[in-house]
Image (tube, helix red, strand yellow):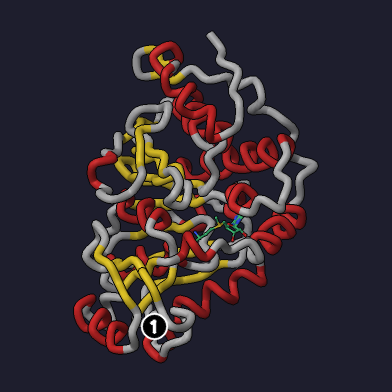
Amino acid sequence: MGLKLTSSLRDIKKMRQMKDKIRKEDKIELDLSKSNNNLKNDSNDELDKKNDEDNNTVDFQNYKYIRVNTLQITPEELKKRLENKKIVLEDTFLDYAFKVISSPFSVGATPEYLYGYYFMQSISSMVPVIALNPQKGERILDMCAAPGGKTTHIAQLMNNEGMVFAVEVNKNRVRSLTSNINRMGLKNVVTMNTDSVNLKPEELGLFDKILLDAPCTGNAYKDSSRIKNRSDILFCSNRQKELIHTAIDLLKSGGELVYSTCSPEIEEDEEVISHIVNLRNDVELVKLDKNDYKGLNIEDAIIKGTLKILPPNEPFYIAKLKKL
Ligand SMILES: C[S@@+](CC[C@H](N)C(=O)[O-])C[C@H]1O[C@@H](n2cnc3c(N)ncnc32)[C@H](O)[C@@H]1O
């Protein structure tokens, strides 16, 4: 049975009601007929252009959170310092992340920011790294790393022990990645400017954990002045499927992958996961629990155990897989 996939956030509720019809045993039956759309014509230059444009589409509402760099300062000390500057902060489900309620000036314009004591990002964008659960001493690959919100979060949780390989295809964006790694004082990150699709286990070795925070149409979604069309969605969906195949090849047996996008489109989310789980017999879904992320508007996605974060939080999709 195939299911015609539609592509708006509004449809997700309707789609969820149909989930029992599209799941059969542990396999997920979605319409994969689109999965072989020709990618070969889509160059990285095109992708670079899309991502450079994405740099201009920051919606500040979504970034009103700070993640404390616990390698440099305690959350309590940073909170005290910022409150002395009349920045009002609120606790979140993470003891090292705060919501910025109000600030007399841009939250990035403090000496504490320049010292690398915190990173500004959405609370949603912290969830993929929490789901990945990095540990000291592990070998972790971040396949789509710039500007480094998640790379620096991973390295922080590893307490500067072990190794993070942060790969980014866009040369301009590698600069912001490197600058954030340096600002945060991280010593266990290696950056690589290359296309992650071409990474090979025989050259890089295998990894304990991989984050694939895939390029997606999400930024267009957040910026209502931009038009995102079906070909953008399919372009991203196809690239995401290529990347996730490479990711599984690079995982150790027993290793874990977190796949995330900031797009609500089913083709970029559930369809990518159903594609990989159905096509490969060396991978299984690890179920995530929405109750681990208190205070967020978060639900099970169509594939139960994969999560969808919804507005007013920044929309995100998160799924976890294990290599058998
Ligand atoms: C969603 S953004 C990543 C955000 C980043 N993980 C963070 O938390 O700051 C996707 C990034 O992947 C990069 N990218 C796209 N395709 C790639 C590829 N094939 N290999 C490596 N990087 C890629 C883009 O240039 C972009 O910087």
| Residue displayed at 30% across by 54% down | 130
What amino acid is labelled 1 in the image?
Gly
**Residue 100 visible in the picture:** yes
Number of dots carrying numbers: 1
Looking at the image, the residue that sits furthest to the bottom is: 111
**Residue in view at x 41 percent, y 73 percent:** 119
Badge 1 residue CB within 8 Å of ligand 1: no
Tell me where residue 15 appears, x and y as whole percent.
48, 22
| Residue 152, horizontal then vertical, whole percent | 40, 69
Decide if residue 181 is on the left or right side of residue 2: left
Residue at 44% across, 55% down: 205
Q: Which quadrant would the C terminus be assigned to in this image?
A: top left
**Residue at the image position 33 percent from the left and 41 percent from the top:** 253
Which x, y percent locates residue 178? 52, 76
**Front-most of residues 109 and 240:** 109
Q: Residues within 10 Å of mark 1 (few under 14, many from 20)?
A: many
Q: Nearer the viewer, residue 142 or 56?
A: 56
Does 232 appear above or below 207? above
Q: Nearer the viewer, residue 250 or 93?
A: 93
Q: Where does residue 154 sit, x and y in percent of width and height?
A: 35, 63
On screen, residue 87 above or below 224: below
Q: Is residue 236 above or below residue 3?
A: below
Residue farthest to the right, as pictured: 41
Residue 321 visible in the snapshot: no
For this rendering, which residue is in front, 245 or 228?
228
Give the quadrant of residue 95.
bottom left
Q: Residue under label 1, please give it.
A: 116
- Picture quarter with ligand 1: bottom right
Is label 1 in a helix, a strand or a loop?
A: loop
Q: Does 262 appear above or below 97?
A: above
Residue 212 located left or right of residue 286: right
